[in-house]
Every structure is written in structure tokens, then in C-alpha cells.
Amino acid sequence: MLIVGAKGFAIELLEVFHQMNNTNDIVFFDDISNDLPSKIFNQFPVLKSLDEAKNYFKKTDNKFSLGLGGPKNRKIATDKLIAIDGVITSVISPTAVIGHYDNEIEVGSTIMSNVIITNRIKIGKCCLINLACTIGHETIIKDYVELCPAVNVSGNVTIGNSVFIGSNATILPNIKIGNNVVVAAGSVVTKDVPDNCMVAGVPAVIKKIF
């Protein structure tokens, strides 16, 4: 497995693989940073070019997972590695609690430790549901959404594409959040949010239009 990224969240994602007893052949990939060692924790190689990643896909394992945050960054990385024959893979922590009825998690999404997902939930492709988030019944989360740690999403919520929701934010029931939205950390969203804006506060109000 190739983990995209070699800092920050990528290190957290490695722990999930360790919990699943699945660290064989793991490598990290980062073709942007200039200050990385040749191995993470003196054990896991860091690939620093697309050519190295392509060779790994060809000779060892063509699967990759996203070890970086930010909806835009995750989309760029996914497209880049699919173009060299990588296969995007979902990662779900063994400590996540996921309901048994009518749930769908699309390819490439990452569900971190202590997340609670109830029933009749749809999570789109390449989403990041970070530590200790909760997602209530009949919620739809579209593609490339990031929920930072301890976000609480109530029931019957719809979250559009490429949305970033900061730590400890709360989305109340029956809310619709548009595409390309940023919800600031600690905000409480009490009414629908249109596309292309940033909201913040308790209750959350529009602070910026993109």
C-alpha cells in the first residue's frame, strides 16, 4: 500500500494500518516536501517522485490511500496517481463504529478511529472522516468532503462536494450545505449554507464568499 503524504495525517493513517496488522509493503509518497528522510520511523520508505510511485505500482502493489487533508489536495493527489495506474482504496479504522443498515461508503474514503456512523448514511468518494466524528441517520455526504476531528453531524443532513468542516463544529438536523464550503472550527450550523462560502460562529453566519 502506498500512502500519499509523509507528514501529519499520513503518520496518523499509518497507525490505522498498524491496528489492522497490515503494514507489509507500506511506503509513503511525497513529491513536494524537500525535508523528508529516506524512511519514516526508519522503517517505511518515502518515494519522492512519480516515477518511483509508478515503479512501486508496477512491481509491488498498485493500491494507494490518501494520507493528506484538504478536499482540493485529495482530489489533485487522486487524479495524479490514478493517471499512473494507481487504484484508490478506502481505509476504515477497526475502532470506528458503523451501523449495519443501508450505509454506503464509496471508494477512497478514510474513516478514522472512534468515528460513529449510524444508519442510512451515504459517504461519497475520497472523503476524510477524522477522529471521533459522529454522523447521524439519513445523512448524505458527497465527494471529497473533510470532517476534522470531533465534528458532529446530526440526522438528515446533506453536505455537498469539496466541503471542509473544522474541528468540533456541529451541524444541526435537516441542514443542507452546498458545494465548496468551509465551516470554521467550533461553529454551529443552524440553517442551510449556499455554495462557495465560509461560515463561522454560533450560530454560523457567512463570513466570506469565494
Image (tube, grey):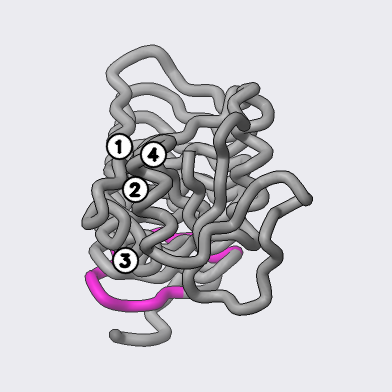
In this view, the mark in front (1 or 4): 4
> Three-letter amino acid code at disc 3?
Ile
Residue 7 at x, y percent in the picture? 64, 62
Q: List the residue tagged with mark 1.
A: 107
Q: Earlier in the sequence, mark 1 or mark 3?
A: 3
Cα gap from disc 2 to disc 4, whole angstroms: 25 Å
**Disc 1 and disc 2 in contact, CB within 8 angstroms:** yes
**Disc 2 and disc 3 in contact, CB within 8 angstroms:** no
Q: Element under label 1? A: loop
Relative placement, left or right, of 126 versus 128 is left
> Three-letter amino acid code at disc 1?
Val
Mark 4 crowdedness (10 Å alpha carbons): few <14, some 14-19, many ≥20: few
Q: List the residue tagged with mark 4.
A: 59
> Three-letter amino acid code at disc 4?
Lys
Cα gap from disc 1 to disc 4, whole angstroms: 23 Å
Relative placement, left or right, of 23 versus 82 is right
Cα gap from disc 3 to disc 4, whole angstroms: 24 Å
Q: Is residue 21 above or below residue 7?
A: above
- Magenta range: 186-199
Q: Element under label 3? A: helix
Which of the numbered marks, if any, corresponds to residue 126? 2
